């Protein structure tokens, strides 16, 4: 890492290596003392130094004035993009209500906007989710459905997996008679790199229970989800 930064900054004799980060100025949040997905999470200083390495790899000088705060900002952004790893969808959906006067028709949330990141290139995935379920004997607060979408969006994702995860979480928590999830999103790994195709929407769906068995019910969901 030091060699990359030394060369990028024009320092050929090793006398001006990158400045060390002041640990006192670093937030205590996510300092590496927690375990995530079975492994110890690196602390902020290690993460920021990794960003410096990537800047040098691009051919930049991490020590020029415009980039001095970039490692901190990138790490803060990564924590925001990945906040879903620290959230439990089952806990969010745990509080349910059974006083619904026998209501048993579709509950549909249309147009839940989400922002995620492609796990292959870390490029944005921006779209909307339409989520519906058929209650059995209980319902959940509407905001909780939107929060569950965000739990899975704020992780590195592929859209197909995210679609299935949202449906599975609702199925587990509510035991409804059916769940329907439809995601429509633009992937910037296609729009801003690679094939450079702007405005292409990717659609994925997951139907469970009665939505999977009853074509008329599934069609009704799709029609309502598309309605203005």
Image: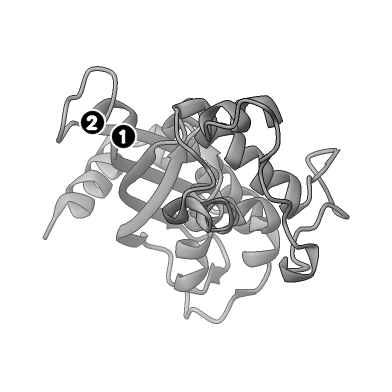
Q: Nearer the viewer, residue 19 or 166?
A: 19
Q: Nearer the viewer, residue 184 or 102?
A: 184
- In the displayed structure image, the side of residue 101 where residue 165 appears, left or right: right
Tell me if residue 63 can be seen.
Answer: yes
Q: SS class of the residue under badge 1? A: strand
Q: Secondary structure at mark 2?
A: helix
* Callout count: 2
Q: Give the residue at mark 2.
A: 191
Query: Is the residue 206 above or below the residue 169 in the image?
Result: above
Q: Nearer the viewer, mark 1 or mark 2?
A: 2
Task: Find residue 21 and report its horizontal and vertical position in percent.
Answer: 72, 56
Query: Pointer 2: residues within 10 angstroms few (<14), some, or many (20+)?
Result: some
Q: Are marks 1 and 2 in contact (CB under 8 Å)?
A: yes
Q: Residue at x 76, y 59 (%)?
A: 30
Residue 5 locus on image (x, y percent)? 60, 33
x%, y% of residue 136? Answer: 54, 60
Residue 209 appears in the rendering:
no
Q: Position of residue 61 (x, y in %)?
A: 49, 39
User: How was this image coloured?
Assistant: one colour
Q: In the rendered image, which quarter contains the N terminus? A: top right
Residue located 17% across and 50% down the image: 226
**Residue that label 1 marks:** 187
Q: Which sits in the foreground, 94 or 210?
A: 94
Residue lying furthest top: 195
Q: Residue at x 18, y 31 (%)?
A: 200
Q: CA distance from mark 1 to mark 2?
A: 6 Å
Q: Residue furthest right?
A: 33
């Amino acid at each position: 890492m030091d060699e990359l930064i030394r060369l990028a900054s024009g320092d050929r004799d090793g006398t001006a290596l990158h400045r060390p980060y002041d640990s006192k100025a670093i937030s205590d949040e996510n300092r590496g003392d927690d375990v995530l997905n079975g492994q110890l999470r690196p602390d902020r200083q290690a993460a920021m130094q990794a960003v410096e390495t990537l800047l040098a790899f691009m051919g930049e000088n991490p020590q020029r004035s415009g980039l001095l705060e970039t490692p901190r900002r990138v790490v803060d952004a990564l924590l925001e993009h990945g906040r879903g790893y620290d959230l439990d969808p089952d806990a969010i959906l745990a509080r349910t209500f059974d006083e619904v006067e026998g209501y048993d028709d579709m509950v549909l949330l249309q147009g839940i906007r989400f922002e995620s990141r492609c796990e292959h290139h870390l490029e944005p995935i921006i779209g909307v989710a339409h989520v519906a379920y058929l209650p059995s004997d209980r319902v959940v607060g509407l905001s909780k459905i939107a929060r569950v979408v965000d739990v899975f969006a704020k992780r590195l994702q592929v859209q197909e997996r995210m679609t299935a995860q949202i449906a599975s979480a609702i199925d587990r928590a509510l035991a409804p008679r059916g769940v329907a999830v439809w995601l429509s999103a633009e992937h910037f790994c296609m729009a801003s790199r690679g094939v450079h195709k702007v405005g292409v929407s990717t659609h994925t769906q997951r139907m469970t229970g009665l939505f999977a068995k009853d074509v008329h019910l599934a069609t009704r969901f799709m029609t309502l989800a598309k309605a203005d």
